[in-house]
Amino acid sequence: MNERIKEVRKKMGLNQTAFGERIGVTATAISKLEKGERNITEQMVLAICREFNVNEEWLRSGEGSEAAMFVLHNDKEIAALCNAYSMDENSIDVITGFCKLPALKREALSALIKDYARIVVQADFMEKPDTEFADDAPPLHMQNMDELDVAQAIIDKQRAADVHYGKGGNAARSG
């Protein structure tokens, strides 16, 4: 099991300190586990499996290929979630693929999706006619724009509004 713990840690791209922090032990404890100088407790097996989405049977026995290292989420649960939100087949594939990622990659992708969603929400807000923006500010056309273009358009539109209403420019808000 010692080598499999090390294999999980390396697959997750973590050093011993970061791996240990995630399961509540020190880097020294992880080092000793990986070298076989310390026995792994039941609690630690469960913590590794829970925190890193590791297949418990694979961790304990080593049975199966490297693909057996991680738990694949229940397709019925994913289907129920997708039905609840009226997702199409493409969305189901995306959600299933996301669930199959190791925890560290899911975290990174989640952060990226949150950033992108924030930009999209702001873009939707910015496209709506709003008396808070200068009348002469050009409308935003988001078609064929990537997320960086959208983000820049939002920033530019907000700067124009700030200047118009005296938050960084000379124009004063009337009203």
Image (tube, rainbow, N blue to C red):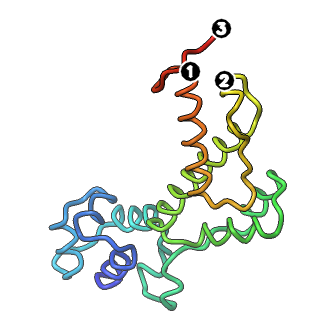
In which image quadrant can residue 88 be found? Answer: bottom right
Q: CA distance from mark 3 to mark 1?
A: 11 Å
Image coordinates for residue 140, horizontal then vertical, percent? 71, 45
Residue at label 3?
Answer: 175
Mark 1 and mark 2 lie on one chain; the one further toward the N terminus is 2
Residue at x 70% of width, y 40% of height: 138
Residue at label 1?
Answer: 165
Q: Amino acid at mark 1?
A: Tyr
Q: Amino acid at mark 3?
A: Gly
Mark 3 and mark 2 lie on one chain; the one further toward the N terminus is 2
Residue at x 75% of width, y 67% of height: 92
Q: Secondary structure at mark 2?
A: loop
Residue at label 2?
Answer: 132
Q: State whether residue 138 is above or below residue 173.
A: below
Q: Secondary structure at mark 3?
A: loop
Residue at x 22% of width, y 64% of height: 17
Q: Would you say the residues marked 1 and 2 are in contact, meaning their CB atoms lie under 8 Å apart? A: yes
- Nearest the viewer among 112 and 61 is 112
Q: Would you say the residues marked 3 and 2 are in contact, meaning their CB atoms lie under 8 Å apart? A: no
Q: Would you say the residues marked 3 and 1 are in contact, meaning their CB atoms lie under 8 Å apart? A: no
